[in-house]
Amino acid sequence: MRMRIAVVVMLVGVLFAPQTPSRAATASDTLVYVNDISDMISLDPAVAYEFSGVLVAQNVYDTLVTFEGEDLTTIKPRLAQSWTIRDAGLTWKVTFKLRPGVKFSTGRPVTAKAVVFSFDRVIALNKSPAFLFKEVAGLNEGDTIPVGDDTVVVSLPKTASPLAFLNILTFTVGAIVDPDEAMAHQSGADRGEAWLRNHSAGAGPYVLERWDPQSRAVLVANPNYWGPKPRLSRIIIQHVPETSTQKFMLETGDADIAADLTPEQAQDMASKPDVKLQDGKLLQLVYVGMNVKQPPLDNVKVREAIRWSIDYDGIIRSLLRGGARKVQTIVPEGLFGFNASAPFQQDISKAKALLAEAGVGGGFTVEMLVPTGPAPGGPKWSDIAAKIQSDLAKAGIKVDIKETVQAQLLGTYRAQKGQMVMILWGPDFPDPDGNATPFSDYAAHSIAWRNQYNDMAAAALAKQAALEPDLTKRRNLYKQLTDKVLHEGPYIVLYQPTKRFGLRQNVQGFVWNPMAYTEFRTVSK
């Protein structure tokens, strides 16, 4: 996953008035959401690619199509009421029919020309999320054409997946911007980028009222919103980097939702009468990569033996305190193409038998690189590594743990020099190809390349699945691919983490989208 860098800054000037835990202090029409938002650098949907910026942009802009709630498998209409995909010979033609009567927050109509402007603007600005259009979808300026006021035709090269393109359009990069408002604030040739950094010009349920960097972003309900009106008229996303402070604010009623609780804090809050816990799905996978050019990891039976040596359930139960799901295939649960097969559990006898068949029944020593700090889900990377070290020792495999900062670890990993590397991955866009190609195709110079896994059949399956327009055929291809990589590939998928939220008891309708945002319009108090 391309790194979304967060710079930690100190929270200044947050005052805490003593509150009785049984009384919510926030106004009835206002939601206070506390989180570390130090990564927020721009609220322009053509620029935002950090978690906090995406959270805001997804609520002030609308897209042509969407995923609703936690479901990332079924595309739903949003600004487009319908769409078709047509094989046009040399290209795919994706045609969108716009919903009638929709207005931007400015009161101007949402038209086909606004869609063209928004897509071409992403490509021209060429900021962090632009690769989703340019590299994944193969789009150039001019490939999106208006047909009248209510129809848009997008031409995609045959090397791109039209289904992946639709999935990309659910994300912030596909947001539709009011072109007149953006160009009215243009500075030089920036198409309004400097102004849209801290203003909004969208058709979403909320409008950006203000953003005070290192403090808060405030959203207010959009009076021109075309859909069901937001249940709360004001959203305050407040910068609170310390999880202990988040917990305190939630307990005293100064916050309605706390976004970053540790497993220990969540356990402590479980018995509190005025708060409740809720898990949100994430698309990250925590895994160990095995370099297949470094003996004995070049032997598929050795890799299978290592997978049979690990106590996955123990890791999830004891270290993550239930804050994860047991997933063992390379497409995470929640995405189209997820394969629920999870055959591996600790079976030392089976592991030893496989090692004997591979000619290393006497065991061997291997180095495992591990990041410093906390892993997704809360425990330290080093604690997970120590558990794996203990598990593999039972099968006669000695693991030397080398703990290093993540930047240095990634440098070694990307240079193909790691033997075993514990790390995480999350897709850049909500499509199975965001995982399938990196894990399966050596030529993509991503995860398969780092582990020197060059399986031409796996790469061909990944490419075929990505480009298949028929959903049933596409699902079957991902089943074949994930089964193959599960047993033959160089990966030990340890778990898929969840994100644990604390909510006041009166908060209803909160749903976390696995692409790391929520739609505040559904939340009520």
Image: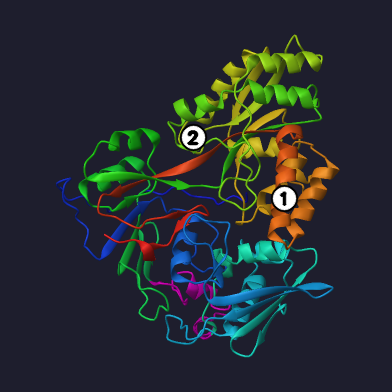
- Residue 44 higher or lower than 6, as above or below: below
Helix, strand or loop: magenta stretch: loop
Residue at x 80%, y 25% (from the top left corner): 299
Task: State which quarter of the image contains the C terminus.
Answer: bottom left
Q: Earlier in the sequence, mark 1 or mark 2?
A: 2
* Helix, strand or loop status at disc 2: loop
- Residue 27 higher or lower than 288, as above or below: below
Residue 251 visible, this angle: yes
Query: Where does the image place residue 400, in percent across and percent down from the top left?
Result: 64, 19
Query: Where does the image place residue 420, in percent across and percent down from the top left?
Result: 69, 28
Q: Which residue, given by chain and number where applicable, does mark 2 sit on? A: 374
Label of residue 370 in the image: none
Query: Where does the image place residue 58, in percent across and percent down from the top left?
Result: 48, 65
311 on left or right of 453: left
Query: Where does the image place residue 209, in percent across and percent down from the top left?
Result: 36, 72
Label of residue 476 in the image: 1
Q: Classify mark 1: residues with Cα within 10 Å, few (<14), some (14-19) or many (20+).
A: few
Q: Which residues are magenta?
A: 180-207
Label 1 sits on what residue type? Asn
Label 2 sits on what residue type? Pro
Q: Is residue 467 magenta?
A: no
